[in-house]
Image (cartoon, rainbow, N blue to C red):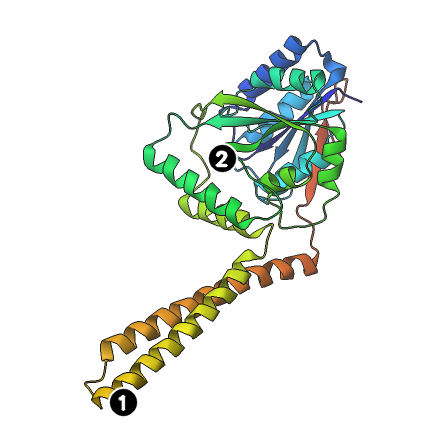
Amino acid sequence: MPALSVVVPCLNEEGTLVELHERLHGVADTLGLGPEDLELLLVDDGSTDATLELARGLADADPSTVVVRLSRNFGKEAAMLAGLRAATGEAVALIDADLQHPPELLASMYTLLRTTDAEQVVARRDRAEDPFVRSLLSRLYYRLVNGLIETVRIQDGVGDFRVMDRPVLDAVLALPERNRFSKGLFSWVGFPTATVGYRNVSRGSGRSGWTLRSLLDYGIDGALAFNTRPLRLLLHLGGWAVLAALAYLVWLLVGYLMHGVTQPGYITTIAVITLLSGVQLLAVGVMGEYVGRIYQEVKARPSYLVHEVIRHQPGPGGSDAG
């Protein structure tokens, strides 16, 4: 069993994959890990560039590199899950392929894992150089999410970059849900956790696949994945709306008794109808999100499909796809 498995989800990472591979081996040398102690799992999540060919070449030349090729693009959560399930190491690390997660930081994270009582070591990104608006929105989002979630707390700046012991990984893999929000799942399983800070760096190559829409969708997943408080908030909102409507009716009745019929309040009526219609659409949307998640779980489709697993094959045959 390797001492350390490193899981790397890959989507169109041809510009950084070779450098990442070299730097991860440099980390292994720093830690004194031999070839048999390291396992590099490159999960190709339906790349459309030369990522798969480069990964295949790395597996041909390096016995410690294994390529898990998915049948299509299933998303980063599915790619991480595929890599975690394939990992065989005593400790397992998650790292992005774009070099925004400094590979050299793994050395201190792994050392901390082995020299302290921590069973998870997570990296927390410093937002000191982020634009003010982005930093503000991030703080507001995490404050909102942590206000909604009842069972766990999600730290601002903490992502998927982490190293964990086998019991932590087994606990995460035992969770059966298909709508996975890994950042929350790692917090939910608990276990003693240490944090290592690092300064944010730019991508090594290419452009981020995260768009404004995908970030918004990811934020919604985080807000709904671990609680039903939005439904309770809608119930409260509906109750207050009913009380406000009753108060308004009483006010109209008192006005009629005191002054008789006055000019109808068309603007007020339109404003109230618009407000209540918006509240109803919001309620339907929130309930739809929960129903959609139930629908996905009931169908019980796998989170991903593996097309092939490519391993080093000694001799003239090269790598072995199975």
Residue 261 seen in render:
no
Q: Quadrant of residue 320?
A: top right
User: Image check: 159 left or right of 277?
Assistant: right
Q: Which residue lies furthest to the right in this view?
A: 1
Residue behind mark 1: 257
Quarter of the C terminus within the rendering = top right
Question: Residue 118: x, y in percent?
Answer: 69, 24
Question: Residue 277: x, y in percent?
Answer: 39, 72
Residue 37 seen in render:
yes
> Which dot marks residue 156?
2
Is 161 rendered above or below residue 37?
Answer: below
What residue appears at the point 52 percent right and 58 percent down from the top-left corner? 230
Q: How many labels does the image show?
A: 2
Q: Give the mark nearer the N terminus: 2 vs 1.
A: 2
Question: Residue 234: x, y in percent?
Answer: 49, 64
Q: Residues within 10 Å of mark 1 (few under 14, many from 20)?
A: few
Q: Which of marks 2 and 1 is in front?
A: 1
Amino acid on which disc 1 is placed: Leu
- Local secondary structure at mark 1: helix
Amino acid on which disc 2 is placed: Asp
Is 285 rendered above or below residue 90?
Answer: below
